[in-house]
């Protein structure tokens, strides 16, 4: 076996790097929801809220399929799917 090319080092992810990226993803999701429901509240419609809920459901399914997320954060998929269902129902009953 030969040595790996030097550009492989760019794409290696350490354990601390994964935890840092996971924390950044969580922070961006929380700040995005806060901004959506406070600053951009007048631009939200029912369809946009239902689409946002669908995106959270897809994010929950994807985080369940990624092994590292399902081992380190086993409840992340459940929380994302539950949040997606709640936001979808809010969008369904939202009056434009």
Image (cartoon, rainbow, N blue to C red):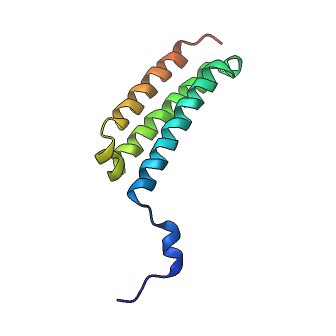
- Nearer-the-camera pick, 87 or 37: 37
Q: Is residue 51 left or right of residue 14?
A: right
Q: Is residue 60 left or right of residue 87?
A: left
Quarter of the image where the N terminus is located: bottom left
Q: Residue 14's x, y, as percent?
A: 41, 60
Residue at image coords 49%, 23%: 88
- Which quadrant of the figure has residue 42? top right
- Nearer-the-camera pick, 69 or 3: 3
Q: Residue 51's x, y, as percent?
A: 56, 30
Residue at image coords 47%, 42%: 23
Residue at image coords 57%, 13%: 94
- Nearer-the-camera pick, 84 or 3: 3
Q: Is residue 71 left or right of residue 38?
A: left
- Which quadrant of the figure has residue 52? top right
> Extreme bottom residue here?
2
Vertically, is 48 above or below 15? above
Q: Is residue 39 left or right of residue 63?
A: right
> Extreme front residue here?
16
Quarter of the image where the C terminus is located: top right
- Which quadrant of the figure has residue 86? top left
Give the number of callouts. 0
């Amino acid at each position: 076996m030969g040595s790996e090319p030097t550009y492989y080092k760019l794409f290696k992810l350490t354990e601390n790097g994964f935890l840092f990226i996971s924390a950044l993803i969580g922070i961006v999701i929380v700040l995005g929801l806060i901004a959506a429901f406070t600053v951009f509240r007048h631009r939200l419609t029912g369809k946009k809220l239902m689409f946002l809920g669908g995106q959270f459901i897809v994010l929950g399914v994807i985080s369940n399929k990624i092994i590292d997320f399902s081992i380190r954060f086993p409840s992340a998929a459940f929380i994302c799917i539950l949040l997606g269902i709640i936001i979808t129902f809010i969008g369904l009953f939202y009056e434009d």
